[in-house]
Image (spheres, rainbow, N blue to C red):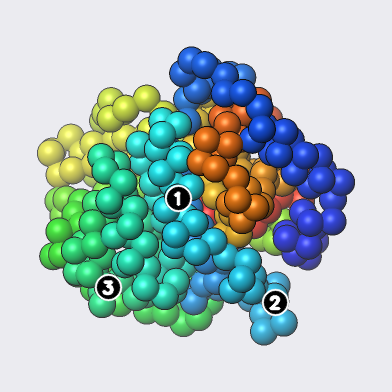
Amino acid sequence: MPTIIPLADARASSQREALDRFVRAAAQGARASGALADTRGRPLRDLRISVTDRCNFRCVYCMPKEIYDANHEFLPRAELLTFEEITRLARIFVDQGVTKLRLTGGEPLLRRNIERLVEMLARLGNIDLTLTTNGALLAKKAPSLRDAGLTRVTVSLDSLDDATFRRMNDVDFPVAKVLAAIDAAAAAGLAPVKVNMVVKRGTNEASIVPMARHFKGSGHIVRYIEYMDVGATNGWRMDDVVPAGEIVRAIDAELPLEPADPNYTGEVAERWRYRDGGGEIGIIASVTQAFCRDCTRARLSTDGKLYTCLFATAGFDLRALLRDGSGDGAIGNAIAAIWRQRADRYSEIRTENTARVPKVEMSYIGG
Ligand code: SAM
């Protein structure tokens, strides 16, 4: 299994220098007119912001313990974007058409005073402001996050079976605490809670139906995610993927389902509702039914690099512009130029071989 430290890799590459030159030239260029769309006609609508590359879990498919151990070098504090820098960039992204911001990581609730950032972002106006968390610190923080202006929350939970879940998070964290966090989030007004379950063959398939049964009728929405080849440390194999079709068939056999229309173009999850009116589930079939065609997402890494695909190998350094005195107009120009030349469609061309390309880790780029 390759042991790639993404930042060192990205900093060393000549690709890095070429990207930096591109960003600088774009910042100084004239703003192209017209609506912002990439080379495949996709608009820029969503920004995922990784606020920390640290996590208190060591999920075996995301931050395996053997790599993210006591010797792993996380980003030093000075490398992180400050809340002011994140908010400034977010405002510029909103000016470019972004309507949805998601805070993620790493574990976003580990970032000190995260509520202050939520408050600053909420002031940007009419945006959907949400956050993805493993739930460990959520029960305590849900009311203050809601008060700060968070609209919704997504909680990751890979199994209701305590032994399976503890094995997957690899820090012995119990299911009961995540369930309590989901209740606390709902009580604080962050409902409906979306519950993300990554399905990995031979690891937690047996939890698919119990998870559906548990949340059916609760108003919360379980979203089953096909296990993906993000990063380069999780040893992904196509055989580990439980295809969306199999997940739907397993649930439908016990709790009959019917397809539901998407809420909007570009929605990541395919919606299915229970025939008896007991709510809905989502399926994120990023491997077997790639949705690159409608992908409107950009990602901002913890240290301020812009990635136009979850599976990118390098990003564009916006922090350099923030810290060299560039104005908002120049930064907006750079973002627009980066988006206009975007051609990513990794999930459409994925094979066992492309999976070995050293992509950046999800904890750094933001899940
Ligand atoms: N720490 C937070 C959490 O646990 O939700 C946010 C970051 S985490 C990287 C975001 C989401 O990505 C989680 O729902 C996680 O399960 C999912 N994820 C991580 N690695 C994945 C992989 N290889 N395939 C599919 N989903 C993955």
- Circles 3 and 1, Cβ within 8 Å, touching? The answer is no
Q: Alpha-carbon neighbours of circle 3 within 10 Å: few (<14), some, or many (≥20)?
A: some
- Residue that mark 1 sits on: 88
Helix, strand or loop under label 2: loop
Task: Measure how far apart labels 3 and 1 are at the Cα level.
Answer: 24 Å
Mark 3 residue type:
Lys
Q: Position of residue 223 (x, y in %)?
A: 36, 48
Asked if residue 258 lies left or right of residue 58, the reply is: left
Nearer to us in this view, 126 or 38: 126
- Residue that mark 2 sits on: 72
Helix, strand or loop under label 1: helix
Residue drawn at 29 percent across, 60 percent down: 119
Q: Alpha-carbon neighbours of circle 1 within 10 Å: few (<14), some, or many (≥20)?
A: some
Residue drawn at 37 percent across, 73 percent down: 113
The N terminus, quarter of image: bottom right
Helix, strand or loop under label 3: helix
Q: Position of residue 74 (x, y in %)?
A: 64, 73
Above or below, 187 relative to 129: below
Residue 141: mark in rendering: 3
Task: Measure how far apart labels 1 and 2 are at the Cα level.
Answer: 30 Å
Residue drawn at 52 percent across, 16 percent down: 33
Q: Viewer-nearest of labels 3 and 1?
A: 1
The earlier-in-sequence mark between 1 and 2 is 2
